[in-house]
Image (spheres, grey):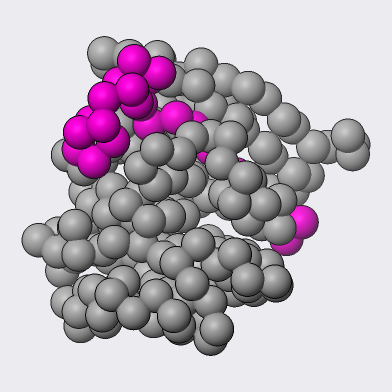
């Protein structure tokens, strides 16, 4: 591992549960991106880890964690409990704000699929304390009641072939009152499985985070 790089597996002790996370901090970290994964996924998500690696190459720290315990994740309905997932993301963010290596870093959220809803709702809760949000193939409609409260610059990324989700993101874009951008990735489906499309998503996301996590308030 390169000199100055920190990689830790962490136990995040929250109010009611302990969750597992992976923290990566490159040398001279520009900011920290906290991942909120979609239903049925985890800190080991291949897609989110791929995105994280590209963010890391741009000087961004990343934190991927399980929003649910193994027992909770075994219950189908719990995977879609946006209230619970949002609370876990809020508590994990608070933990990171107090954790020595990360407490002074500007923070942003990367939300995938239903995880984008909890990311946006947590961003609404934190206001200016969260500096940027990226939604990958997200379901911001599940946070529609909170969208007008989001202050963090928000990027909505949707596959051009993901027609239903594209419509939902267009409605969310109209509801957001922060700096925002809706970017349609052509010839891409919901999971961006087509050659080169996830890389495109990751590179666009990295640029967004670098811009807003390093900007002066």
Is residue 190 rendered to the left or right of residue 125? right
On the image, the x and y values in percent for residue 139 come to 29, 61
Residue 142, above or below 215? above
Residue 130 highlighted magenta (yes or no)? no
Is residue 191 rendered to the left or right of residue 68? right
Q: Residue at x 43, y 55 (%)?
A: 112
Q: Residue at x 28, y 35 (%)?
A: 79
On the image, the x and y values in percent for residue 142 come to 19, 57
Q: Which quadrant: the C terminus? A: bottom left
Of the pair 48 and 196, the residue shown nearer to us = 196
Is residue 46 rendered to the left or right of residue 21? right
On the image, the x and y values in percent for residue 24 come to 67, 37
Of the pair 6 and 196, the residue shown nearer to us = 196
Residue 65 highlighted magenta (yes or no)? yes
Whether residue 123 is visible = no
Residue 161, above or below 11? below
Residue 131: quadrant of the picture? bottom left
Give the residues in magenta: 57-81
Residue 178, above or below 106? below
Of the pair 112 and 76, the residue shown nearer to us = 76
Q: Residue at x 37, y 19 (%)?
A: 69
Of the pair 179 and 171, the residue shown nearer to us = 171
Whether residue 82 is visible = yes
On the image, the x and y values in percent for residue 109 come to 43, 53
Q: Residue at x 70, y 71 (%)?
A: 195
Residue 124: quadrant of the picture? bottom left
Residue 91, above or below 158? above
Residue 100: quadrant of the picture? top right
As drawn, which residue projects farthest toward the left?
Answer: 145
Q: Which quadrant: the N terminus? A: top right
């Amino acid at each position: 591992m390169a000199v100055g790089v920190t990689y830790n597996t962490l136990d995040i002790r929250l109010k009611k549960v302990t969750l597992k996370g992976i923290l990566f901090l490159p040398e001279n970290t520009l900011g920290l991106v906290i991942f909120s994964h979609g239903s049925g996924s985890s800190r080991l998500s291949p897609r989110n880890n791929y995105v994280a690696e590209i963010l890391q190459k741009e000087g961004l720290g990343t934190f991927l964690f399980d929003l649910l315990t193994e027992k909770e994740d075994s219950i189908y309905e719990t995977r879609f409990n946006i209230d619970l997932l949002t609370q876990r993301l809020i508590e994990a963010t608070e933990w990171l704000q107090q954790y020595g290596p990360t407490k002074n870093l500007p923070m942003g959220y990367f939300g995938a699929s239903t995880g984008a809803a909890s990311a946006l709702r947590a961003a609404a809760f934190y206001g200016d304390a969260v500096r940027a949000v990226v939604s990958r193939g997200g379901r911001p409609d599940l946070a529609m009641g909170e969208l007008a409260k989001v202050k963090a610059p928000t990027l909505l990324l949707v596959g051009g072939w993901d027609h239903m989700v594209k419509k939902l993101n267009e409605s969310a874009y109209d509801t957001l009152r922060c700096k925002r951008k809706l970017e349609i990735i052509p010839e891409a489906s919901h999971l961006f499985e087509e050659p080169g499309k996830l890389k495109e998503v990751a590179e666009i996301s990295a640029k967004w985070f670098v811009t807003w996590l390093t900007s002066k308030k």
